[in-house]
Amino acid sequence: MLDFNNTEIAFSAKSQSELKNAYLLFNTIKYPWLVKCASVVSNIALNIHFPLGWAVKPTLYKQFVGGETLQDCTKAIDHLRKFNVRSTLDFSAEGEQTPEGIQATFEETIRSIDFAKGNDNLAYAAGKNTASMTGLVMVLAGIAMIWHLIYFKYVQFNKTSWTEVPAKTILLSIPFIIAAMFICNVASEFIELPNLVEDTFIGMSRNVFGIIAIAVMAPLVEELLFRGAIEGHFLQTGKRPGMAILLSALIFGLIHVNPAQVPFAFCLGLVFGWLYYRTGSIIPGMIGHFLNNSLATIAMATSTQEELNEKTVDMIGATPTYILLAAAIIILVGMYFYLNKHLPQPGTPSEITNTQA
């Protein structure tokens, strides 16, 4: 009888060298920072077409993947059956976000279902929409992060803190934020950094969990974490306001990892950080963050790949782009001086962090 509590039986399908390689692999990937760095490096390598198969296939791929095709999977399934183990076929068919790519993905999924049907060597077959799963995981992780920040009092709430920022201040903050968003977007287009997660975000923008994760959960969690907890901590521990805003924005930008997002996130982090410092509340930044992510989600969900890759200057022309850019700069500078003059002077660091919700 198969008993997975007995490791000798459980690993009987593995050779001694395979077990040693697995032990080494798991001891390597147990460090989150190393995994994150490896992910960034591998994405960059893929974008410049640097071959990775020689390193990935004998290690990660061999450990976690049964095969690239159904035929490849058959070898692993048949091998395990020799040791009285019936496999679970966990398939994921992915393709480009085009009509042809979607059709090819659908056909491959049907082939996988037909392959599993009536196969005595399989105990179960499971399929998944990768984008939906990513969105669901992000939503659950966001809920866990919010609980952690509140439970351990990194962020403190009180009943009046949600109404301490007047509606007028929030309304005046919106054009300030929109102007900053436009300037940052145009600047990012000119830099032309690679977008390593574009396909993932496009997929997420077309399912409910992905939309919730990007448009709702991300603004809530990131403002609580980077403004409420991190910037609040810097202010509370005596950092000068400008340095606290700069450091929190820098961390906010770098944590996005994706090169195309880093400068954009950093610039918006400065805007959200300044609003948090001057108002003592994350609400203006949260509303601006929600607005930015919602517009991005709508654009990804309703545009083709070609349209998403178009620059603003290509879509509306050079002259209108520069006119809008000049107007955005005027609005940004003007609203900064107006808000800086009319907003109440910030309290002490401890007062700011106690009203940060």
Image: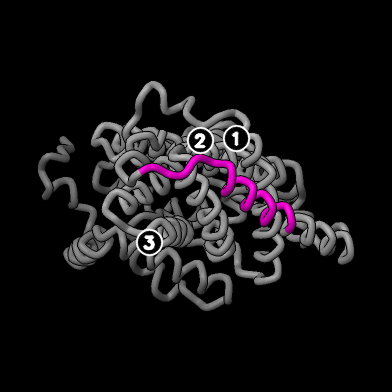
Label number found at residue 170? 1
Which residue matches tag 2? 283
Disc 1 element:
helix
CB atoms at circles 1 and 2 under 8 Å apart? Answer: yes
Q: Quadrant of the N terminus?
A: top left
Residue 70 in picture, x, y percent from top left: 51, 51
Q: The residue under label 2 is which amino acid type? A: Ile
Label number found at residue 36? 3
Residue drawn at (29%, 40%) of the image: 154
Region rendered in magenta: 330-347
Q: The residue under label 3 is which amino acid type? A: Lys
Mark 1, residues whose alpha carbon is within 10 Å: few (<14), some, or many (≥20)?
A: some
Along the polypeptide, which appears first: circle 1 or circle 3?
3
Q: Is residue 225 above or below residue 118?
A: below
Picture quadrant of residue 314: bottom right
Marks 3/2: CA distance?
A: 31 Å
**Residue 261 in magenta?**
no
